[in-house]
Amino acid sequence: MRHDPEHTWGHTIAFGDQYFQRACELLRTLDEIPAWTAVADHAVRTIRAGSTVHANVTTGHMPTTELANEREGNPAPFAFQGPDHHAPEQYAAMRAGDLLLTNCVTPAVREVRDRGVHVIVFTTAYVNSGAAPPGWLGDNPGGLMPADVADQVIDTHIPWEQGLVDVPQVPEMKVFPGSSNVSCAIHWCLTAEVMQALGAGGSPDGAKAREYLTILLERLDEVNRRHRQTIGEEAVGLAKRVIGGGHVDVRGSNEGVRADAHGVAQGLMLTCAYEPRPAAEGGDADTVIVTAVSADHPQEVAWAEEARGNGSRVVTVGMETSPRLRELSDRYLGNACDEAGGVVAVAGCEEPICPTTGIIDNVLTQMLLAQMTDEMCRRGAVPYFYMGLYRAGGREYNAVLKRHFDARGY
């Protein structure tokens, strides 16, 4: 039987490359949203009138901690809500004249709109907006659609499938999540616009949102040029270790990237599925990916030291200025960021605001995991993925596949 050394195993673009390309394509589409200036202007007028902007474009995993008001570089102009939904008492406290920015499509959101809260719904993969073919997604509560509960609906271009990578061996869905990158960028773009207008005493014009996106995309291009080959090399060894019984953990003092790698819709089952273990119990086959948004954070240094003590391989995605983490890492992927906070200078703020570290760390981590999957598939070891619970049959799919995962380990 003839063996073709150039066999593509069903695909002609590396999974890591495909993730990067599609993630950047989605971020570029944000610059095409015509409502940026109008949304930011409404937020500014709301704040100046003494009312509250409630920000809840967080459905998913990473945004909950990445966008927290305590986050470095976040001037926190909004009443931020991390969980996917506000609690009943929070909705009850909203007043006419407030502004609600959300992904939610529920009777509670419709009720606050009817009370005079201006509601803007941003579409997301996790909430049925009518973009999917009929029957592929679960219904929203009460059968509602975004236009039923909102004064305005903004299409974020997040694909209803959530995944960005086509794995031929997983034909039932695209895999590796992309929504968090977009949701976080939306928050930072609006924050930059609002803070500039409040500080300068004028009105938003879209310039600061575009500045943020430009810096983010330039840095993503830079890290891709710098690390694409390295990620490909690292993925080969990572795939071999997983196939041989190794585990993969993702750690970070800012838990956003870990959240997007663990138990996420269309994400790998294998990441963060096991506790650290000593070398004698298999830890020398394991890999710990540290994702850092600040320089040499003590907790991240401690995790890297623990991993080294367990004989595990340490891969760090992080700041350019982290000498200790570099020393502890077998592979260090710099994120082209050397600032602890934000990247956009605005009037009235002493330091730049709106960070890029979280999104860049997430893209690099997903690229590595996607390319590891590429190498696993080429070796006949296709890993298992979670299907989003918002998808029809997702819960049942996960219950079946989880049994296979528990038996095989990946």
Image (cartoon, rainbow, N blue to C red):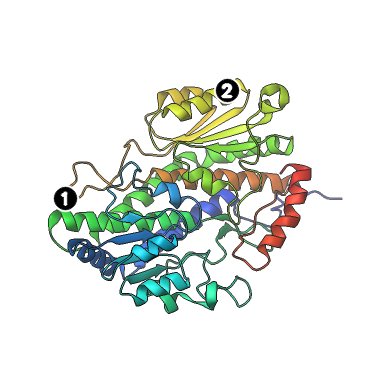
Disc 1 target residue: 347
Pinpoint residue 49: horizontal percent, then vertical percent. Answer: 18, 65
Neighbours of disc 1 within 10 Å: few (<14), some (14-19), many (20+) = some
Q: Residue at x 65, y 56 (%)?
A: 167
Which of marks 2 and 1 precedes in the sequence? 2
Q: Residue at x 45, y 36 (%)?
A: 253
Tell me: residue 77, above or below residue 314. below
Q: Secondary structure at mark 2?
A: helix
Pinpoint residue 228: horizontal percent, then vertical percent. Answer: 51, 42
Question: Which mark is drawn over residue 368?
Answer: none
Left or right for 348, reference 29: left
Q: Nearer the viewer, residue 54 or 260?
A: 54
Instruction: Count up the numbered dots.
Output: 2
Pinpoint residue 353: horizontal percent, then vertical percent. Answer: 27, 46
Q: Secondary structure at mark 1?
A: loop
Residue 169 visible to the viewer: no
Pinpoint residue 40: horizontal percent, then vertical percent. Answer: 26, 64
Q: Residue at x 50, y 77 (%)?
A: 144
Tell me: residue 169, above or below residue 287. below
Q: Nearer the viewer, residue 104 or 175?
A: 104
Q: Label 2 sits on what residue type?
A: Arg
Q: Nearer the viewer, residue 392 or 36?
A: 392
Task: Give the CA separation, mark 1 to mark 2.
Answer: 45 Å
Dividing the picture into quadrants, the one containing residue 13 is: bottom right
Q: Residue furthest right?
A: 1
Neighbours of disc 2 within 10 Å: few (<14), some (14-19), many (20+) = many
Disc 2 target residue: 308
Left or right for 329, reference 399: left
Q: Label 1 sits on what residue type?
A: Ala
Tell me: residue 376, above or below residue 400. above
Q: Residue at x 36, y 74 (%)?
A: 113
